[in-house]
Amino acid sequence: MATTTTPTPETPSAVARKPASPGKQRLSRRRRREALSFYLFISPWMIGFLVFLLGPMIASIYYSLTDWDSFNPPKWVGFDNYVKLLTDDPVFWKALWNTFYYAAISVPLGLVLGLWLANLLNKQVRARKLFRTLIYLPTLIPLVATAMIFRMVLAPNGPINDFLGLFGLSGPNWLLDGPWVKPALILMSAWGAGAATVLLLAAMKGIPRELYEAAEVDGASATRQFWSITLPHLTPIIFFNLIMGLINAFQIFSQLYILIPKGKNPAGYDAAQTMVPLLFDQAFSYYRMGYASAISWLLFLVILVFTVIAFRTTRRWVFYETEVK
Amino acid sequence: MTLDSARFSRRGFLGLGVAAGVVTLTACGSGSGSSDAPLLMTVWGGDPDRKTYQARIDLLVKKHPDLKIKLQLIPGDAYPQKVQTMIAGGTGPDIMQVAESVNTYSSKNQLLPLDDLAKKAKLDPEQRFGPVGSLYTYQDKLYAIPDRSGAVTVFYNKDMFDKKGVKAPTADWTWDDTLDAFKELTVPGKVWGYSGAEWFPQWWSLAYQNGGTIIDAQGRPAVDSDEVVEALQWAGDLVFKHKVAPSKADYADMGPDIGGDQAFPNQKVATHANGFWVMSGLTKVEFGWDIAPMWRGKKQAVSAFGSGLAISRTSKQRDNAFKAIDFLTSPEAQTEIIASGQDVPANLEVQKSQAFLKPAWMKTDVDMGVFAESSEFVFRAPFIPEWNQMQDVISNGLADFWLGKERSAKKALTALQKDLESLIKSAG
């Protein structure tokens, strides 16, 4: 650190001569210009964040403490919305459970699948570029199209059930039959494992070859190499995918909205309703904005708790090469 | 020092942003149009709807050059949210299209009662629209003037009826006659006699035919009455006992997004009860088809699909807005609705006019008089303020029934009654 090569002698000198001095004056003008251009370039994003995100977020805290139909002035009700949600709304708990169920299975499943696919694609197989494209392709297909395809695939006499029929199993009415709707959604989420695969594959390519060579010389098997070299090097990417996957899973909305539309498939919707669709219904269908705001803050807390837990455990399992050196 | 000032400016920046956010939020509340701005009219639908509404507005402006109207068309799915946002933002429409959820707005004090304006303009809704005239009243006040209103009619495949030697359906068919015909027309696994049992306008028609109501005169839910139970059981039996109507699983196997509206043109079902729009899928079919009024139970009753035009309470130009609505629902402007093939105009005079009975775009001979005939016995559906929640509760409550997991209508409706009671009590 002491032998820094960047031409920034002003930092140590400014610190050394802490009281105001002519030297600082001159240098800080340059700094100020730099700061100005920093704010200039960041401001579109900052203003967008503050006006369209932070402002409404703060407003929604207030609204969550009111009874507000979005037309008439909000009525202050204190914590009534939260109390009602947590003690007197079975639909909320059901939606929370459905959300956990989905996140708890789809996120790990996506990671394992991604890891497995990346590992396969990293081998010297024929036409692996083609396979790579094919595996990433589902990610590029718009969600609406994916959902339409899955509606056909998961039809009572669709391809999946035909396939199960080959083994003498009679498949369920995936999207119509209560207990099978969530597994169907998870199945669809697994189809998008290609996104994680690409990131993991890139990280695999970045692992130094000499580690494997050394391991080979020491007589380590391929499996041993995977567990002792590949996997530890991938943990930062796995961690990233875990966090993003958790947040996305907790906020699942569009898939439900398209795959099991409330109007046409009430049984399916009822069986798999998660937090965001619940919030949407309350806000825009039942005109209970205050209640919906309270739901959104509870969802925010849930996501926050899980993200914090994930971050807290990083020391135990996430390996950063730079930290070792 | 530098660190401190950086932190300060960051905090200052945050504060500025919060202020900006709050200002934008509150600023939305104060903006609104001046009194000589054009009237803003919101409607839902797609491009054909836009053309029809615009054509009617053009007629209006020709007749009343002092009126200006700006039409805003919003896709159906997004309509409630969009209008909600506009009203909350203080820029609500002057004239808005409303339908079943009309009293969500009227009960929240968002719509102008129209009784006085109608009286002043000598517009008598009963006379102009028949029973539908009072459809959009809430607590004895009129909140919207009917604009489009088409009853559920029975579409039937003439070729299939001829082949099986079944006589064409009529308004005098009883439930027994109807079931016999459906059984006759069904070819197991290939063609079903009927589709259209499980959507609420369809089975509610049966409930009202049987003398039942969904919400009684006192505003209490009444779905566990014997009349409603019997009607739902009959509808459910069509699907699961007699198997003369496709189940959800049968539809799902026909393809994604297939329902009766698609199954009928594809000759998967011989009869289908639904609204006017089914015709748009029938302009190019090869087989012969026609429509008939809904059959009858103990009495005649049928649902209607439609919408009305309302004036928002924040409108600065109430008189002009009403003048526009008065003209838009007059025979002159309403003729445009059928001429373009968009929908059934609510105006009875137009429903009986030659323009409606023989529209230019109709290639085959279809008995359009059925709509005017059906308008006479449209039942008044309960447009309660909690309409959307009620629909969700009903469709959730009957989900297992329509999957065939719960075969007893009595059990399903007893449970549903309890859910509806808790909804309507808590909302009241």
Image (tube, helix red, strand yellow):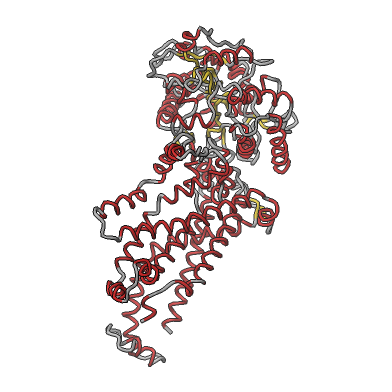
Residue located at (58% from left, 33% from top): B403
In the image, residue B333 sits, relative to residue A26, either above or below, namely: above
Q: Is residue A273 left or right of residue B12?
A: right
A78 and B301: which is toward the camera: B301
B49 and A126: which is toward the camera: A126
Image position, residue A58 (x, y; %):
55, 61
Q: Which quadrant of the figure has residue A270?
A: top right
Residue located at (34% from left, 79% from top): A31
Image position, residue B313 (x, y; %):
59, 39
Residue located at (26% from left, 51% from top): A130
Image position, residue B175 (x, y; %):
63, 15
In the rendered image, the residue lying farthest to the left is A126
Q: Is residue B118 left or right of residue A318?
A: right
In the rendered image, the residue lying farthest to the front is A219
The C terminus of chain B lies in quadrant = top right
**Is residue B37 at all visible to an observer of this figure?**
no
Q: Which quadrant of the figure has residue B61?
A: top left
The N terminus of chain B lies in quadrant = bottom left
Residue located at (36% from left, 46% from top): A141
